[in-house]
Amino acid sequence: MKIVIVGSSHAGICAGLRALEEYPEAEITLYDKRNQVSFVSQGIISYLAGQKSVLFQSSYSSVEELKEAGLNMQMETVIEENDTNHKKVFYRRSNSKKTKVTDYDKLILATGSYPAMTSVPFDKKSNLYFLKSMEDAIKAEEFLATAKNIAVIGGGMTGVEVARITQDRGIQTTLIHRNKNLLNDYLDEPASRLLESWMNAEGTRLLLNTEVTEISVDGENTVVQTANGQKIAVDGVIFTIGFRPNSYLLNQQVELGDRGAVVVDKYMQTSCPDVFAVGDVSTTYVKFIRRESLSSTCVRCCSRRRNCGD
């Protein structure tokens, strides 16, 4: 049996190792566009707070270890297309334009999620930063090393943590949140107001109940414009408005649910019998809302069909 797994973060690695246990004679190949595996993005916050070694300790496995375990690792490989009808994936090496094709008996999609991007117009020359991969973290740290004035968009857990860290580093920080309360999915209003008072005392500028309508460039500044007419000129913007399932390879080929998450059953099987989805790209059953919703880190906010700011 030939098993193809797309993605080599936590879910992809777990699926590959578990498949090896159940089907030791199977040919199991993991494809990933990166050159590393198993990066834990939670380490980014500690890294930005000054714990530099944390970022490079945020991988619990390596390509070599997985190869020794029996997995065929195809790194720096981009999956361009998937054909579930003919059980084929089309791919190319990152440094090549030549497309190749391989077939499979079972396909496991473990492509995770990607940072949600604001739907408002923005200038491509704007200094915009996201916090998902190791590369994102390094770019953000390089920016913060010289920044004097920044905006953080999104007042969930990540946004609040980043804003407090940057303000503590002596960077004037403006936190913009579309809801009237910070951490509105976690705290009641009195607790949120207490948090606001702490952040105000630290020097953070809070713009709550505020929608961003445009991001442009004016000279060396990135300018954030809001619905109420404010224009905030900053050195750059860090987005922390949540994540979306990276399910484009199965678009219009299997059933998709909330925000494009792949609908799966309790065996992680999709509506296509030989295709499975695991991790942040798939749905999971959430007891407190009594329905299928986004998996893992996405379920906190995106299952409610809006940007929660985290």
Image (cartoon, rainbow, N blue to C red):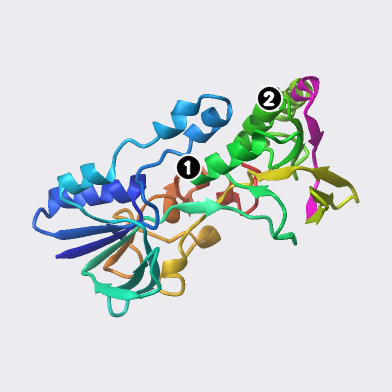
- Is 136 magenta? The answer is no
Is residue 11 positioned above or below 94 on the image? above
**The residue under label 2 is which amino acid type?**
Arg
Where, by quadrant of the figure, is residue 240 drawn? Answer: top right
Labelled disc at residue 155: none
Q: Position of residue 96 (x, y in %)?
A: 38, 69
Would you call the spot at circle 2 few (<14 residues within 10 Å), some (14-19), or many (20 or more)? some
Q: In the rendering, which numbered label is found on residue 169?
A: 2
User: Where is residue 3 shown, x and y percent of the image?
Assistant: 22, 62
At label 1, the amino acid type is Met
Q: Looking at the image, how many numbered discs can be counted on the residues? A: 2
Secondary element at tag 2:
loop
Q: Which of the pair 119/128 is nearer the observer?
A: 128
Say whether marks 2 and 1 touch (CB < 8 Å). no
Could you tell me which residue is drawn at 31 percent across and 79 percent down?
A: 85
Q: Which residues are magenta?
A: 199-213
**Of 35 and 120, which appears nearest the observer?**
35
Q: Residue at x 57, y 50 (%)?
A: 302
Quick check: can you spot residue 189? Answer: yes
Residue 303, given in percent of the width and then of the height, sits at 55, 50
Residue occupying the far bottom of the picture? 86
With respect to residue 77, does 99 lie above or below? Answer: below
In the rendered view of the protein, which quadrant contains the N terminus?
A: bottom left
Classify residue 18 as left or right of residue 268.
Answer: left
Q: Is residue 172 left or right of residue 134?
A: right
Asked if residue 206 lies in the magenta stretch, the reply is yes
Task: Identify the residue at the far left of this view.
Answer: 25
241 versus 117 height, above or below: above
Q: How far apart in space, not on screen, are marks 2 and 1 (Cα)?
A: 21 Å
Numbered mark located on residue 134 in the image = 1
